[in-house]
Amino acid sequence: MFLASLAVTGGDTNLQVIITLGSLFMTFLVISGIGLMRLFTTRYRLTEDRFELHTGLLFRSERSVPIGRIRGVDVTANPVHRLFGLTTLRIDSGDQSDAAARRLALDGITKAEAVELRRQIIALRDAGRARPVADSDGVLSRLDWSWLRYGPLTVWGVGGVFIAAASTYRTLSELQVNPLDLGVVKDLEDRFGTIPLWYGVLLAAVVIAVLGMIGSTATYIENWAGYELRREDGGILRIRRGLLATRSVSIEERHLRGLELVEPVPLRWARGAKLNAVASGLGSQEDNRRRRGLTPPTPRDEAMRVAAQALPTGPGLIERKGLLPHPKAALRRRINRALMWSVLIAAVPVGLGLWLGRWLVITGVITGVVLVPVLVAFAFSAYHSLGHLLRGRFLVMCSGAFARRTVALQRDGVIGWKLSRTPFQRRAGLITLGATTAAGEGVYHVHDLTEGQGIALAETAVPGLLAPFIERAPDRG
């Protein structure tokens, strides 16, 4: 970093640069010392009824988890681990409590030790229980590199460009380097400093979009290279993926409560989708979002095929075809919301233009004229995405405009109902019905039903669960 700072500043340095680099070096030493102390003081033991982990010298920690409560045994390896043939074994009890109290991690053991320890833990946990036997092959899906075309179809890459730019600017500022004085920036200013403002904004947007697509593609490769979904003996779905940092996540089929098909707008336009598991035992909501993926962004037909095999209840479980539509009041709500946002966004440049110049007023008016049809189109799309249906043992629900989500949730996995409505919903006579469960996100919503529809759906899906909270109107003859 010292050599890099000299290269950036042209060989000049100052006390601020030395202090900054020195503080970074001291931080490195402290973190390395803590890591070495944890490594030298870690001891673990596996017995017939529990797994124990002891760590620490000055601050000792002794934790254990009963074998019967273990829900996940995952194996991960970052690039440094892979360089030395090491890995990290994570043992998760699946509780929703604090991650430090819920998860035990053995960092820096060999891959062979991790695989053998995981085998022993699963064998002890499932002792005396009938374990399903997988097919001879057991592979449900493998990565097809033609799926890489779905990598750029995400907005997260654009956000990453802004985050990287902000981080670079802050780092250079800490090193007392003004980014605007760099030779590259000066050269760009000389080349494009005289172009019209609208052209510069358009060019910058194109560059940011291209960089975002490149970043999204690189993230796709890093996250999903080597992807394989396999059904193993014992009723376990195993997902392996990762290029630099490898990950192996296990989901027990007996804890699988449903599936979720996610179709964000760019991916939906390309007839792509992503399949997630709705399962208990995946930890907190943050852990669940990181571990629930069954497929990468993939062709929709492939996601549907995997869904039919991962949850063998017959084809078409999470298809939108046949879902019951919602009342027209839900469409009016979405159109009103689209018009409101169009006015609010356009009002910002119009308001500024009253003080700064007429051109901002014109910009605001044009913005509003453009936004109204676009957002109204999304409102119609959001309404057509709404739907629900009872399919056998599952409650199927769909919603979303920018990211359409179709969820199939086991009815016997619903442990409660949550009925809510905003003041605008009360005026329209609508409610939102939430199915609470111990799996996945914890609650899945059926948006904008009439009161009668919502209560009837809840009572039909899980008879008697809502009955103690229903007050029947007296018969007036």
Image (tube, helix red, strand yellow):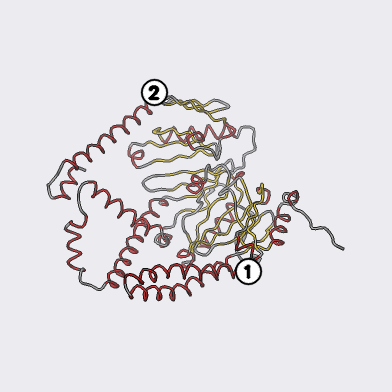
- Relative height, residue 119 to residue 302 (above, below): above
Left or right: residue 36 compared with residue 418: left
Residue situated in front as seen by the camera: 463 or 114: 463
Mark 1 and mark 2 residues within 8 Å of each other at the beta carbon: no
The percent coordinates of residue 96 (x first, y second) are: 55, 40
The percent coordinates of residue 463 (x first, y second) are: 74, 52
- Relative height, residue 49 to residue 151 (above, below): above
Quadrant of the image occupied by residue 65 = top right
The image's mark for residue 58 is: 2
Q: Amino acid at mark 2?
A: Leu
Q: Amino acid at mark 1?
A: Ala
Residue positioned 62% across, 39% down in the render: 131
Determine whether the residue tagged by mark 2 lies in a helix, strand or loop.
loop
The image's mark for residue 329 is: 1
Dot placed on the residue nearer the N-terminal end, 1 or 2: 2
Residue situated in front as seen by the camera: 244 or 278: 278
- Relative height, residue 357 to residue 303 (above, below): below
Left or right: residue 434 compared with residue 301: right
Residue positioned 41% across, 44% down in the render: 246
> Viewer-nearest of labels 1 and 2?
1
